[in-house]
Image: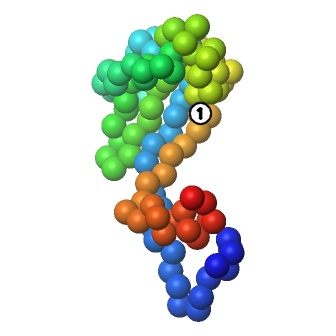
Amino acid sequence: MRPGSAPRGYAPPPVELDHVLIAVTDLDAAARELEGTHGLASIRGGRHRDWGTANRIVPLGDTYLELVAVVDRGEAAASGFGRWVAGAATDAGRPFAWAVRSDDLDAVAGRLALE
């Protein structure tokens, strides 16, 4: 089956929003601003090993916002994700990516002709 085509009656497996990533220059400052301005509290996430980044999580029911920042410039420069965050980060925060989830990842990958 090629992408975009499906047998009659076929319903693709559901794909749901998991989280939105927001690149910031300072995690703690961004967390204070988000809570002060919008009342959205965050919790410390963690450091992303070998990527040079770290995060804070803003729970929103079944989904969340992920504040992410470069915390080690050298490590981030050697990582695709670290370079992506570094290029997107602003003091105010900038949404730059989103992630989805599915209970049937193999079916989604097959529908999109991905391995």
| Residue 57 to residue 31: above or below | below
| Residue 51 to residue 96: above or below | above
Using the image as rendered, state which of residue 36 and residue 29 is in the foreground. 29
Using the image as rendered, state which of residue 90 and residue 98 is in the foreground. 98
Callout 1: helix, strand or loop? strand
| Kind of residue sitting beneath label 1 | Pro
- Residue designated by label 1: 95
Residue at 58% in and 7% down: 74
Residue at 59% in and 38% down: 97
Where is residue 68 drawn, in percent x and y? 49, 24
Where is residue 3 drawn, in percent x and y? 67, 71
Query: Is residue 57 found left or right of 74 in the rendered image?
Result: left
Residue at 58% in and 28% down: 81
Query: Is residue 73 found left or right of 87 in the rendered image?
Result: left
**Image quarter in which the N terminus is found:** bottom right
Q: Residue furthest bottom?
A: 8
Query: Is residue 70 found left or right of 3 in the rendered image?
Result: left
Q: Quadrant of residue 25?
A: top right
How many labels, in total? 1
Residue at 43% in and 48% down: 18
